[in-house]
Image (cartoon, helix red, strand yellow):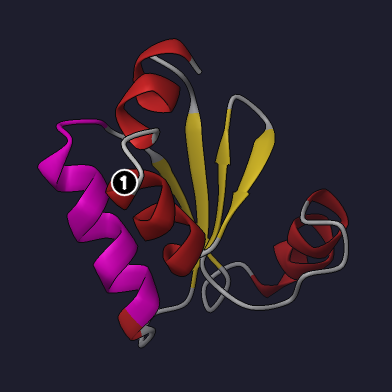
Amino acid sequence: MPEIVMYTTTYCPYCSSAKSLLDSKGVSWEEINLDREPHRRAEMIEKAQGRRSVPQIFVDGKGVGGFDELADLDRGGDLDGILQNG
């Protein structure tokens, strides 16, 4: 299983949707909640190449993007392969 890291905030509907989608795939992830760990926002922005919105999702260190990109990968049939192979 690949390592999945998701940067989130507490009251973010897109974060909740991303978590639900990943739950439906039966995978686990590390959640970094920026409300609880605000000092990690700069880390997220750097890893996400300047993107500031949440969620920001990384699979084995590679940026997937946010919920919209994750959902697009799922609709296109590519997400399962990424989650299996990293």
Nearer to us in this view, 15 or 67: 67
Quadrant occupied by the N terminus = top left
Q: Quick check: 63 above or below 85?
A: below
Residue 56 location, quadrant:
bottom right
| Residue for point 58% across, 71% down | 34
Q: Quick check: 20 above or below 3?
A: below
| Residue for point 35% across, 58% down | 71
- Residue numbers of the magenta segment: 14-27
Reading the image, the residue beneath label 1 is: 74
| Residue for point 43% across, 65% down | 67
Percent coordinates x, y for residue 25 in the rendering: 17, 36
Is 66 included in the stretch rendered in magenta?
no
Residue 54 location, quadrant:
bottom right
| Residue for point 58% across, 41% down | 58
Q: Please state which amino acid type lies under the numbered disc 1.
A: Asp
Q: In this view, does 24 lie to the left or right of 41?
A: left
Q: In this view, does 52 lie to the left or right of 53?
A: right
| Main SS of residues in magenta | helix
Q: In this view, does 51 lie to the left or right of 35?
A: right
Q: How many marks?
A: 1
Q: In this view, does 7 lie to the left or right of 72?
A: right
Percent coordinates x, y for residue 22 in the rendering: 25, 45
Crowding at mark 1 (Cα within 10 Å: few <14, some 14-19, many 20+):
some
Percent coordinates x, y for residue 40 in the rendering: 73, 61
Percent coordinates x, y for residue 19 in the rendering: 27, 57
Disc 1 secondary structure class: helix
Residue lying at the far bottom of the rendered structure: 11
